[in-house]
Structure formats: structure tokens, C-alpha cells
Amino acid sequence: MIDIAKFAEVVDEAARTARAIPQFTETATLSIAEAYEIQARSIDRRIKRGERLVGVKMGLTSRAKMAQVNVHEVIWGRLTDAMRCEEGGAVSRARYVHPRIEPEIAYLLKAPLSGDVSPAEALRAVEAVAPAMEVIDSRYRDFKFALPDVVADNSSSSGFVVGPWSRPDVDCSNLGIVMEIDGRAVEIGSSAAILGNPIRSLVAAARLAGPPLGGLQPGWIVLAGGATAARPLAVGQHVRTTIQDIGSVSIRVGE
Ligand code: OOG
Ligand code: MG
């Protein structure tokens, strides 16, 4: 028998104290369903500490991301209010084990969404779209994991920042993306790298995360997944992502 509550406590403590742990799959056999159950219980512990669910993040929705971590399956995780960083503000390096940052597209929902929906139905539930970035920080040593490990670890999600919102009628199917660190372009890509069109990531969010969460809710944010590989973060850096037609978002890295 797998002790779901125990695994949830271990990964929650690793996240809370920014200390790396060994991969669960080194010593246990976890199904994907069990891994999502561990994720749910670990985020429940945060909710009990006063955090609020504000959306979901989709992961491994592009080849660049799949190749970087050698896991080839679309995954999802939960976003809480405490994970949100202020646009233009600072994130604290000390809160993370080995943080990386990646460009994202954020959808803001105005209607509930769950189950099998078409891209057109998904788009009708969107209030706005924005350039965003996600700070990912695997709780596992050396940022190495198998699929059940990363799922149990909230799909590495640790922080996110959202830029200015645009109306949802902007065509997001093939927008140029540039992520700069200290003014130097370090990752260049296109939103088309996200499942061919990032709206498909919202469709996947409705199908995969909708039912277990009682539906994606109005007011929630959905991150579509990195279109490029992620980059390590270091104290003092200034990171900016610009997405064609929808603008820029930036953060600094503090101690
Ligand atoms: C897993 C999380 C993937 C994305 O945008 O693809 C992700 C990881 O890279 O550690 O957030
Ligand atoms: Mg991501």
C-alpha cells in the first residue's frame, strides 16, 4: 500500500523549506493516478495554511520542454495565490532549490470549463490572454525525475508572473516569443510550439484538470506551458519575456 499522505507531506515540506529530496520512484512504484493524488494532498496542506487555488499550469506541452526534462507526457499542476509574483517585482532565490524560468502564455477564464471541449468552446470561456513566466523548481535532487515524481511535485510549479492582459480575440496561434536575461535574448520561440496552438493546451486543461477540480473556474488563470526550454535563475538577474502582439512581462531575482 502506498501511503499517499506521507508522500504528500514529504514533497510539501521539501517545497516549503526549499530542500531537495530523492525521487519517489527510486524506492516506490507510483501510478500516475497515485501521483496526482499526492499532488492534490500536498496542495491541500497549503490550502490549510491559508493559500487559495487560483488556477492551473499545463506542462510539457512543447517538444523543447519534453526534451529538456526527458518526460514526454502532458502534465498539469495547481496554482495558488502565494505562488504569484508581482509583475516587475522580485522573486526571492532563497525560496527555491534550483529555480528555472520559462516563458508562458496565460489565459484568464470568465466561464467554467471542464471535460471534452473544442478549441472554439475553450476560447469562448477566455476573458483575456497575457504574456507570463513560470518559475519551476523541482523538489528532486539535480532536477531529475520520472513522470510520477514530477506529477506528485505539482509538476515543478513554484511561481508565476503575469503581464498585461489583452482581449482574447488576439490570434495567439503563432506569436514570436523572446525571453531575455539581463537584456540578452536567451530563448526564442513561437507560441505554435505549444501543441501547435496554445488554445489546445486550454482544451487539455479542461479535459485533464477540469474533472478532478470540479471544473476550471471563472477568474482562474491557466498557464499553457513553456514554448522553449527553461533557464536557471541566479540572484541579480533581470528576466523579461516579450510575446508578439501581447506585450512583455518581467521580474528580478533577489536574495
Ligand atoms: C516540468 C514542468 C513543465 C512546462 O511549462 O512545460 C512546465 C519541468 O520542466 O520541471 O512547467
Ligand atoms: Mg511551465
Image (tube, rainbow, N blue to C red):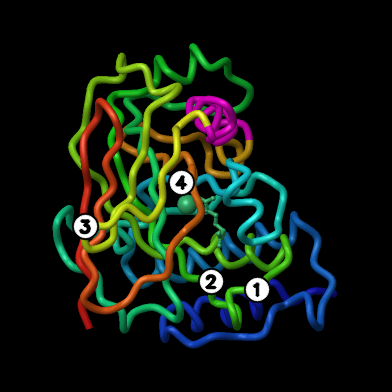
Residue type, label 1: Lys
Secondary structure category for the residue under label 1: loop
Range covered by the magenta-colored residues: 193-207
Q: Position of residue 164 (x, y in %)?
A: 18, 37
Q: Residue at x 50, y 31 (%)?
A: 202
Mark 3: secondary structure: loop
First in sequence: mark 1 or mark 4? 4
The numbered mark at residue 85 is none
> Which residue, given by chain and number where applicable, does mark 1 sit on?
144
Does the CB distance between marks 2 and 1 fall below 8 Å?
yes
* Cβ of mark 2 under 8 A from ligand 1: yes
Residue 92 in the image, given as x and y percentages of width and height = 25, 76
Q: Earlier in the sequence, mark 2 or mark 3?
A: 2
Q: Please give the residue where the numbered disc 4 appears in the rendered image.
A: 56
Position above or below: 199 against 41:
above
Label placed on residue 138 = 2
Q: Residues within 10 Å of mark 2 (few under 14, many from 20)?
A: many
Residue 170, quarter of the rendered image: top left
Question: Pointers 3 and 4 in contact (CB under 8 A)?
Answer: no
- The kind of residue tagged 4 is Val
Indicate whether 173 appears above or below 17: above
Q: Nearer the viewer, residue 66 or 213?
A: 66
Magenta portion: prevailing SS class: helix
Left or right: residue 224 compared with residue 34: left
- Amino acid type, label 3: Gly
Q: Counting residues from the N terminus, which is met first, the one under dot 3 or under dot 1?
A: 1
